Amino acid sequence: MSFLEEIQKRRTFGIISHPDAGKTTLTEKLLLFGGAIQEAGAVKNNKIKKGATSDFMEIERQRGISVATSVLAFIYKDKKINILDTPGHKDFAEDTFRTLTAVDSVIVVIDVAKGVEEQTEKLVEVCRMRKIPMIVFINKLDREGKDAFDLLDEVEQKLGLKVTPLSFPIGMGYDFKGIYNIWEKKLNIFSGDNKQTISEGVEFDDIDNPELDKIVGENSANTLREELELVNEVYPDFDQEAYVNGDLQPVFFGSALNNFGVKELLDCFIDIAPNPQPKQAEERLVDSKEEKLTGFVFKIHANMDPKHRDRLAFVKIVSGTFKRNTPYLHVRNGKKVKFSSPNAFFAEKKEIVEESFPGDIVGLHDTGNFKIGDTLTEGEQLNFKGIPSFSPEHFRYVNNADPMKAKQLYKGLDQLMDEGVAQLFTLDMNGRRIIGTVGALQYEVIQYRLEHEYGAKCSYENIAVHKACWVEPEDPKNEEFKEFKRVKQRYLAKDKQGQLVFLADSPFTIQMTQSKYPTVKLHFTSEF
Ligand code: GDP
């Protein structure tokens, strides 16, 4: 197979949703179609369950599972499909944001009864900003839920999307009769008892065909005809280019649990979803069809075995062919590195591979040289963009609780930050370290991992910080910036990249600071 064909057959995407909307169930059903797993229930759930074990112990247990589910790859109808796992728990939202830099499209799962939920809004906003093509899957149609048109409205309004349904439900909950597949002009009848089996659709080019009345009953048939007419009037026709540009989002309905509507989703997905897309680097736009290898690290999994500081860096291949035992340039540290056992991922296992292509994810064993965002090339000085840090929500001083282990503590903190567990800020004034996280859970994780992986102990101390604002002066030499630095001295810190950050204690402070120093811009993400 030629290099171009390899690229064209790849579909790398993520599934995003609010917890419990059905992401795990849908993933599992997709894998079943790919023959990647044999039975339902095979995909281990890496959700964090509240229960007898404390949360951070649970996270430790899950960390083992989540290496295996980080990338789920399978072949379906000659397409190589890579699903990148995204944690649903909101404390790990930053992980999900980073993973979204490595996908070429996403599927958004929405619960028909709950509609658009908080996590969905946040994640979709990131996809929208990045113009990632999205398909919406409305799930749990076997249950009573919101009216289909109301839901489409809600999706447009709350998520700021422009939708067009490519399938439409006939009834819902108790009355759920099936789904009309607008994309393929096919009718699929739902029968509750053929759960898990793949139902065959009835072709229905003309929905005025009286056969429809026989199959679903006259009332339902007429309602469907009216609704499809409305769909036709209200929503634009599907347009491939608009979808790929992030300007139009097709919508499917179904029930993941009953494996209903999932095949339609998958068949359409492999037709319309984009193959590996060009990616913007600071220096230039890199096309996937370029022959020379480029790729970037979007995730690091560390210390699965604390005895060997082993880490696995996940690299998305952007262009070229990644080859085993071939030296590549690690752009940030300027060194050539080669990898004797790069891993490829399959549904339930990882294996050493000789070659990987654009769209693929390779797992590279690493002893601490990689950070999230690092770029690999064949020699070109290139830095991929788009892995920003967001302002954390929680801030605490971190103190060394065992003076004999200072070195271990700093090394541990350093590596955990490289992994993206949290963000470290160092105060300009006195060099004290502050850890910022998205969720409170991470503090326990950090404490636990420092102790178990690095033999270091830390304690925390509260600090009143509302948000970290990255500072961008219009003119670093002007008086205003000098005054800002003098007045705010106690609240200024550096992030790990050495960028200047203002730790504001309240929204009011941010507002006041912005109006007092209009030439000093404050940003809530590290990339601007
Ligand atoms: P996730 O948190 O988004 O990964 O959600 P899960 O896939 O774990 O699903 C959450 C719950 O919803 C589980 O109890 C599933 O069995 C259930 N569920 C998923 N899909 C459906 C569906 O189509 N119909 C019904 N009735 N329940 C579903």
Image (cartoon, grey):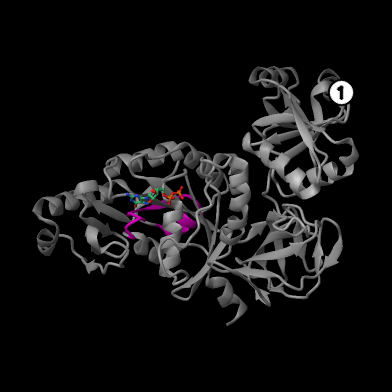
* Image quadrant containing the C terminus: top right
Front position in the image: 216 or 250: 216
Q: Residue at x 33, y 54 (%)?
A: 255
Lateral position of residue 237 relative to residue 411, left or right? left
The residue that label 1 is drawn on is 482
- Residue 372 horizontal/vertical position (percent): 72, 52
Front position in the image: 22 or 65: 65
- Residue 65 horizontal/vertical position (percent): 58, 57
Lateral position of residue 60 relative to residue 368, left or right? left
Report the span colored magenta.
239-259
- Residue 200 horizontal/vertical position (percent): 26, 69
Residue 203: quarter of image: bottom left
Front position in the image: 398 or 372: 398
Residue 386 lies in the magenta-colored region:
no
Residue 357: quarter of image: bottom right
- Does residue 201 sit above or below 241 in this rendering? below
Residue 242 lies in the magenta-colored region:
yes
Q: Residue at x 84, y 42 (%)?
A: 410
Q: Can residue 485 be seen at all in this image of the molecule?
A: yes
Lateral position of residue 197 relative to residue 467, left or right? left
* Image quadrant containing the N terminus: bottom right
Q: Can residue 472 be seen at all in this image of the molecule?
A: no
Q: Secondary structure at mark 1?
A: helix
Q: Residue at x 43, y 70 (%)?
A: 38
Residue type pointed to by label 1: Lys
